[in-house]
Image (cartoon, rainbow, N blue to C red):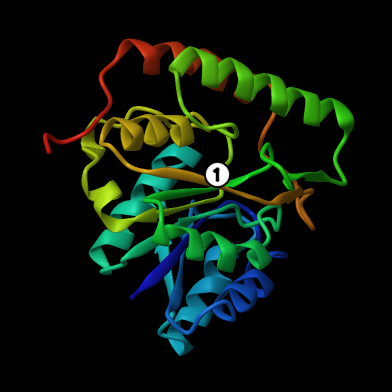
Amino acid sequence: MKILATLPTFNESENILPLIDELLGVSRNLEVLVIDDNSPDGTWKLVGERAETDPRVHLLHRVNERGRGSAGVAGFCKALELGADLIVEMDADWSHHPRFLRQMLRATRRADVVIGSRLVSGGGETGRNPVRTLITQGANLYIRLLLGLPVRDCTSGYRVYRRWVLEAIQWEKVQSNGPAIVQEILVAAHAAGARIAEVPILFEERRAGQSTLNSKILLAGLAAQWRLLATQPPVRAL
């Protein structure tokens, strides 16, 4: 079984190579795909050099596009093209630590989508401002009630998908270009009948570099939930 971890990146040169090493140690069947939006700090160069010597490392270097949403979509489509059976989605700043991945992969025996969750028993956040934790809890309550999702941590971008779930999505109809992409895909997976499970993780502050997330992006993401409510999920007829 081929496992492929997708890592959208922008200016993650300080984090990316140690993270790749850690991920490759999780399983001999695991490969890594970095989707980089032409990072000025040369993240794509570091990954490209590594990919030249390691067949388990892949680079998708995007020169004319930028955005967490479109990078995620591009990564999923490339993962399917590369023949992945299980596709991992995670951040590249160590906030999603690879030490939780083995348990998440085991959970795919009973689920089609596995979410690394901060909001189930045993999960949480560490090293973060308490205000940020309250924002996370409030945003998830808002999204869960609005969209009717049977998930506690709807905003977690640490997930594992079975191949068929991503094949069921009509990617050309996906609209989100920002953080709301994780909810749009979750809505589509739920509409396709995917079994969803949550595994507890500890979300950590990034190790190095600066986050591109700000209050404007957060508010836009919350507002985007109303569009998801009003539109049909981009799912193929099954």
Q: How many marks?
A: 1
The residue under the point 22% across, 49% down is 167
The image quadrant of residue 160 is bottom left
The residue under the point 45% across, 19% down is 148
Front residue of 195/175: it is 195
Residue 115 horizontal/vertical position (percent): 53, 47
Residue 234 horizontal/vertical position (percent): 24, 30
Res. 67 in view? no
Front residue of 120/14: it is 120
Which residue lies under the disc numbered 1?
157
In the image, farthest residue toward the left = 237
Which image quarter holds the C terminus?
A: top left
Residue 189 horizontal/vertical position (percent): 33, 38
Residue 146 to residue 81: above or below: above
Secondary element under disc 1, as helix, strand or loop, is loop
Front residue of 69/192: it is 192
Residue 93 to residue 134: above or below: below
Front residue of 207/29: it is 29
Res. 74 in view? yes
Residue type at mark 1? Gly
Which image quarter holds the N terminus?
A: bottom left
In the image, farthest residue toward the bottom = 53
The residue under the point 43% across, 42% down is 196
Q: Is residue 107 left or right of residue 39?
A: left
Residue 175 horizontal/vertical position (percent): 34, 27
Q: Is residue 181 left or right of residue 142?
A: left
The residue under the point 49% across, 64% down is 105
Structural crowding at the residue carrying mark 1, measured as other residues with C-alpha within 10 Å and reported as few (<14), some (14–19) or many (≥20): some
Q: Is residue 135 left or right of residue 79?
A: right
